[in-house]
Image (tube, helix red, strand yellow):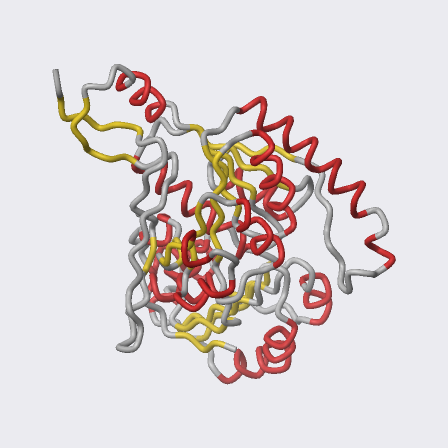
């Protein structure tokens, strides 16, 4: 007997990621692509005896993310995981990344399981002596990644770029799992470019990026960049500011304050850090109601901290996991124009100065 049911379409996709879509310009013709991916749901008439099995697969969907290195690679993966969990709470999610890395703290802070695999970095130029052990380290990383995938048995593996995701993507194809990659930038990095040849689908933020990938016209879906659900929550400005400057709450300073949020990138944007270093103290002296939240980036923090004078209206931090609170507290954002940062500023509606 035929029945209408929600089925686990073996590979049928209508992309529905948490994104802000860039409007098409008059000269840009939207592309409509029919791709196939495992985790998507579809409504169709079916009298197939495998319907129960297919629905069980949907209810027990397992997804692995290979993401790390920088916030620009980590947080798109977190945003996709957020949407999967929001749509299907029973989805099992595992993140793989480097030990003692940014992702090893950022992912657990976001509430997801994290496991480590040894990773290897490609140094520039390609013939650099630092790459002498690259083949050995890459094979070692693939073997460890394959072992993790064999234990977790994912239906689909997401790669969001960076050297961390490269071996995981290769292991996914060896394992027989479906591989999907997501490219945040207008021009893809080496890892995503190579993996796109093996991937079942490629999600991109810009229409022009399609031409950067081999077989891009048949694999790419233009859907913008995913934005974390936490950034869409309404956080009170007063509460957010109180978390960064708790000592100022008692005297009511924060009610009339102006808060400048400086984002030096997850690793460190040298030009922004130097500019702020030269200006911050004078700005604070001339504006008694000004507060500065300054994310220096992990690699630049120690140097900046040694050069900066303590001030009650200045908060210096290497990296922020609670970006929703930081955006809520800010009146103005100064940042490098990274792809994900631009989308997050757009999502939160904050005035910004971008470099």
Q: Position of residue 85 (x, y in %)?
A: 36, 35
Left or right side of 39 for 318: right
Left or right side of 214 for 224: left
Q: Position of residue 217 (x, y in %)?
A: 41, 58
Q: Position of residue 348 (x, y in %)?
A: 34, 62
Left or right side of 224 for 322: right
Q: Nearer the viewer, residue 51 or 262?
A: 51
Answer with the quarter of the image where residue 54 lies.
Answer: top left
Q: Position of residue 290 (x, y in %)?
A: 45, 75
**The N terminus lies in which quarter of the figure?**
top left
Left or right side of 45 for 15: right
Q: Nearer the viewer, residue 324 or 102?
A: 102
Q: Residue drawn at (44%, 71%), measured in percent from left and top?
A: 333
Could you tell me if residue 249 is visible in this image?
A: no
Q: How many numbered marks are there?
A: 0
Q: Residue drawn at (65%, 50%), measured in percent from left and top?
A: 163
Could you tell me if residue 195 is visible in this image?
A: yes
Answer with the quarter of the image where residue 47 lies.
Answer: top left
Q: Nearer the viewer, residue 257 or 9?
A: 9
Q: Nearer the viewer, residue 104 or 136?
A: 136
Up/down of 41 relative to 166, above or below: above
């Amino acid at each position: 007997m035929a029945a209408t049911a929600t089925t686990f379409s073996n590979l049928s996709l209508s992309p529905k990621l948490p994104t802000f879509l860039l409007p098409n310009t008059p000269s840009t013709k939207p592309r409509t692509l029919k791709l196939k991916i495992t985790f998507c749901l579809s409504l169709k008439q079916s009298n197939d005896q495998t319907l129960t099995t297919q629905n069980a697969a949907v209810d027990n969907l397992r997804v692995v993310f290979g993401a790390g290195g920088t916030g620009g690679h980590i947080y798109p993966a977190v945003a996709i995981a957020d949407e999967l969990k929001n749509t299907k709470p029973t989805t099992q999610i595992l993140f793989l990344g480097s030990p003692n890395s940014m992702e090893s703290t950022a992912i657990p802070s976001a509430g997801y399981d994290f496991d480590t695999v040894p990773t290897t970095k490609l140094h520039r130029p390609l013939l650099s002596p630092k790459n002498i052990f690259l083949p050995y380290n890459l094979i070692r990383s693939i073997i460890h990644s394959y072992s993790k995938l064999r234990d977790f048995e994912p239906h689909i593996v997401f790669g969001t770029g960076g050297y961390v995701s490269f071996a995981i993507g290769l292991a996914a194809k060896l394992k027989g799992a479906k591989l999907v990659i997501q490219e945040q930038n207008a021009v893809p990095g080496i890892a995503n470019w190579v993996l796109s040849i093996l991937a079942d689908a490629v999600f991109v933020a810009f229409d022009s990026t399609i031409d950067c990938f081999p077989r891009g016209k048949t694999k790419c879906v233009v859907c913008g960049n995913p934005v974390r659900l936490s950034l869409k929550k309404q956080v009170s400005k007063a509460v957010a500011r109180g978390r960064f400057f708790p000592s100022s709450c008692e005297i009511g300073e924060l009610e009339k304050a102006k808060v400048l949020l400086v984002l030096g990138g997850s690793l460190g944007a040298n030009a922004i850090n130097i500019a702020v270093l030269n200006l911050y103290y004078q700005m604070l002296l001339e504006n008694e109601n000004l507060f500065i939240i300054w994310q220096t980036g992990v690699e630049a923090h120690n140097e900046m901290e040694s050069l900066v004078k303590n001030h009650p209206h200045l908060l210096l931090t290497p990296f922020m996991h609670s970006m929703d609170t930081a955006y809520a507290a800010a009146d103005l954002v100064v940042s490098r124009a990274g792809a994900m940062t631009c989308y997050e500023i757009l999502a939160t509606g904050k005035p910004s100065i971008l470099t």
